[in-house]
Every structure is written in structure tokens, then in C-alpha cells.
């Protein structure tokens, strides 16, 4: 089945540094990928929609200059958390849409990246 | 996208069927019902989806009422590994985003 790989699985870094998270679709081409954030004991919250070859679409309240998204190829989207601070510590999850022959194919998710900012 | 309502938690004995309900009374004609689950500290896992007919795969069965206002996910023989949060999501066709609600926390016990 469709596989989405996310890297790294966890990262710890100092406040003020930037962190890049990669999301790859391994066996299909994804023109659209999504980035979510999940705080402890809460549900997934959509941050942005990543579109190959064009600008990402951010959800209301998500700072686009803080969370930089690049979708330069059909199999790779990256999320960069710039100048990260402790409040950015969270579980970041990506998903990719397998286009398939019909428009109702499911999204497949990566295993998430646990980001801890000290 | 239509909103869904699920019970916050359910318990099930190992080996028994787990029936997880979902209400989506405002679903529109071209919207599908998707089910995902999230095991602790992992990304969501796709389970099944359907439009109006009942669906079955190797993981579960999906029963959608005739008026499409509710559905039930059935895990026929629950195992301890099925303990997870189960999300019912309604979504239209195309590359549309998934909006997650609070889901149902299913606890399968020995």
C-alpha cells in the first residue's frame, strides 16, 4: 500500500534554531501534501496544504513566516520551523494524497516528528 | 465539510466485535465517510471509507445508514493492538483536507 515517510522521527534542539522536517511519498506521486500539528491529548490540527510547484495554503492562525513549507517535487515536501521556541514543541505529522484513478482515494500519513525545543 | 460526532470513549473485550458509531447528519451527497485510527505516538492509519454502500476490507467493515446520516465502524474480532483513537471524518472528492474531530478512544481489554 501507499507509504509516506517522515524524517526525522524526533528532534531536540535549542531555542532559536531552525528545524527542517521532510515528508516523502515513497511509491506514488503526491501533488498535494498536508501538515498537521498535535499537542498532547489533543486531536490533529491542520496547519497547511502543500502544493507541488506553488505556494502552500496556510490555515487561519498559522504563521507562514514561522512555518516554511516547500514542495519542490512530486515526492517531497518539507516543513521548516524557523527560530523555534519551546511553545513550538509538538508532534508534527504530514500526509500525502495518493491521486489514484478516482478522486476519493485516502490520504496516507507519516509516523510523525516529535519536536522538543529546549 | 460536514461535522461528525463520536462518543469520547468505548471499551471492548478482546476477541469481541467493536462497533464504533459516528453521526454525520449534515453530510452532503458527494461527501465520503473516512475512518482513521491513531495508536499512541504514531501517525493516523487509514482504515476504510465509503460513500453510501457498506464496505469491508481486511481491517474492518463500514456500515452506512440508508439516509447517510450515521455510520458504524466494525472491528469484528478486536485485539489488544486495536486500542487507539478512532476518527470518523467526512470529506468531499478530490484533494481536500481532512479535518479531525476528537475521535473515540477505544480500549480493548483482555
Image (cartoon, coloured by chain):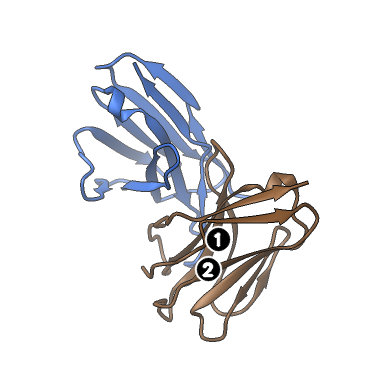
Vertical comparison of B49 with B26: above or below: above
What x and y, as percent, mark residue B13?
Answer: 75, 54
Front residue (pair B5, B9): B9
The x, y position of residue A94, in whole percent, is: 43, 42
Crowding at dot 1, Cα within 10 Å, few <14 / some 14-19 / many 20+, comes out as: many
- The secondary structure type at the circle numbered 1 is strand
Q: Residues within 10 Å of mark 2 (few under 14, many from 20)?
A: many
Q: Residue furthest right?
A: B15
Q: Is residue A58 above or below residue B3?
A: above
Per the image, the residue denoted by label 2 is B22
Number of callouts: 2
Q: Is residue A51 visible?
A: no
Position of residue B21 in the picture relative to residue A23 (left or right): right
Q: Is residue B40 left or right of residue A47?
A: right
Q: Residue at the spot x=55%, y=38% of the render?
A: B42
Q: Tell me what hue chain B is rendered in.
A: brown
Q: Secondary structure at mark 2?
A: strand
Residue underneath mark 1:
B35
Is disc 2 in the same subunit as disc 1?
Answer: yes
Chain of the residue displaying label 1:
B
Question: Residue reaching furthest bottom?
Answer: B66
The tint of chain A in the picture is blue
Q: Quadrant of the C terminus of chain A?
A: top left
Residue B86 placement: quadrant: bottom right
Report if the CB atoms under discs 2 and 1 are less than 8 Å apart.
yes
Tell me which corner region of the image, top left, top right, bottom left or bottom right, holds residue A64: top left
Question: Height in image: B68 above or below A8?
Answer: below
Q: Work out whether mark 2 precedes mark 1 in sequence or the reverse, and give the earlier one.
A: 2
Foreground residue among B94 and B70: B70
- The vertical placement of A105 against A61, above or below, is below
Can residue A87 be seen at all in this image of the molecule?
yes
Amino acid at each position: 500500500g501507499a507509504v509516506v515517510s517522515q524524517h526525522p522521527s524526533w528532534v531536540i534542539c535549542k531555542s532559536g534554531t531552525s528545524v527542517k522536517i521532510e515528508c516523502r511519498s515513497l511509491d506514488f506521486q503526491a501533488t498535494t501534501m498536508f501538515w498537521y500539528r498535535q499537542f498532547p491529548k489533543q486531536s490533529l490540527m491542520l496547519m497547511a496544504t502543500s502544493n507541488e510547484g506553488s505556494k502552500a495554503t496556510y490555515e487561519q492562525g498559522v504563521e507562514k513566516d514561522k512555518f516554511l513549507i516547500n514542495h519542490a517535487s512530486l515526492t517531497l515536501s518539507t516543513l521548516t520551523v524557523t527560530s523555534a521556541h519551546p511553545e513550538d514543541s509538538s508532534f508534527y505529522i504530514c500526509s500525502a494524497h495518493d491521486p489514484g484513478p478516482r478522486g476519493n482515494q485516502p490520504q496516507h500519513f507519516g509516523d510523525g516528528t516529535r519536536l522538543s525545543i529546549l | 465539510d460536514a461535522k461528525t460526532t463520536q462518543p469520547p470513549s468505548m471499551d471492548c473485550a478482546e476477541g469481541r466485535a467493536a462497533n464504533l458509531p459516528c453521526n454525520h447528519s449534515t453530510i452532503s451527497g458527494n461527501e465520503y465517510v473516512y475512518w482513521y485510527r491513531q495508536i499512541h505516538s504514531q501517525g493516523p492509519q487509514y482504515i476504510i471509507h465509503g460513500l453510501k454502500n457498506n464496505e469491508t476490507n481486511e481491517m474492518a467493515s463500514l456500515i452506512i445508514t440508508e439516509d447517510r446520516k450515521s455510520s458504524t465502524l466494525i472491528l469484528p474480532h478486536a485485539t489488544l493492538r486495536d486500542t487507539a483513537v478512532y476518527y470518523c471524518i467526512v470529506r468531499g472528492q478530490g484533494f481536500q483536507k481532512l479535518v479531525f474531530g476528537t475521535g473515540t478512544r477505544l480500549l480493548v481489554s483482555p
